[in-house]
Image (cartoon, rainbow, N blue to C red):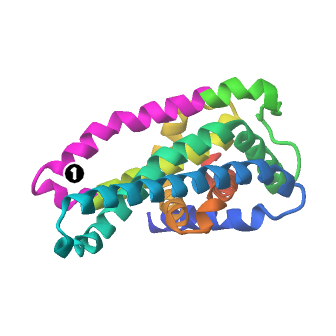
Amino acid sequence: MIGGFVQGFSSLFQGFSLVFQKGIRGFVLIPLLINMVIFSGAVWLAYTQYQQLIERLLGWLPIWLSWVEWLLLPFFALLILLVIYFTFSIVANFIAAPFNALLAEKVELKLRGGNVVGSNNISLVKNVGKTLGSEVSKVLYMLKWMPVLLLITVIPGLNLIAPAVWLVYGAWMYSLQYTDYPMGNHNLFMKEELTVLRKNRWDALGFGLATTLITIIPVLNFIAMPVAVSGATALWVKKLSS
């Protein structure tokens, strides 16, 4: 259990070294640019919406209650973080999906030192439909569990464990999100991918938690996507494919 969790966690950080290696760097550029543009736009939108919301709120309050802004700042900062975390991550991955699948193939070739048995030998144009369809399946799977999470969050007593539940949920979803690229290259689909991850759930949760951490850290979140794709491919090669 602990060994699997550590292996999954460390696989993400192996992605940092992989994205700078010769033969891979060129395939990192487009996912990196997409991630930077989407997250920069998300931060700008979140900041402007926060400013407008605070201005309206202060307009309703007497001047002597203006200090309320400092009480609300942590709440709205957390709310904005969650919006960026779930919404814009989905958007970024949806746009970059075909390029991420290609990056995963190149990383696997690098790690295995040659041809990859069972790989699709990806053509970017031909792979667009498949990867986008896979993204839709992942979003539907994510939404399926959302009502349960919302109930846990609002029910008194149960809401005490809500932060931990959301963390585990986020880690699992990130694991599914990024391991889908190397597994999809081997013609595995949602049902088969979930079977593989459930058999290696501690590896998956370790990888997902590490991905969550770099996604919410400023600056690191700009390179999170290509690093996570590379790290997930490393985990696939080391453990999941067996």
Camera-nearest residue between 65 and 99: 65
Side of 116 where 78 appears, left or right: left
- Identify the residue at horizontal 79%, vertical 53% (top origin): 29
How crowded pointer 1 is (Cα within 10 Å; few <14, some 14-19, many 20+) is rated as some
- Identify the residue at horizontal 20%, vertical 58% (top origin): 60
Residue 172 covered by magenta stretch: no
- Identify the residue at horizontal 65%, vertical 38% (top origin): 95
> Is residue 239 visible in the rendered structure shown here?
yes
Q: Which residue bears the numbered disc 1?
A: 153
Image coordinates of residue 195 in percent, x first then y, are: 49, 38
Quadrant the N terminus occupies = bottom left
> Is residue 183 visible in the rendered structure shown here?
no
The magenta span reads 133-162
Camera-nearest residue between 97 and 197: 97
User: Residue 11 appears in which quarter of the rendering?
Assistant: bottom right
Helix, strand or loop: magenta stretch: helix
Query: Furthest residue to the left?
Result: 156
Side of 118 where 57 appears, left or right: left
Side of 92 where 53 appears, left or right: left
Residue type, mark 1 in image = Thr
Image coordinates of residue 4 in percent, x first then y, are: 51, 62
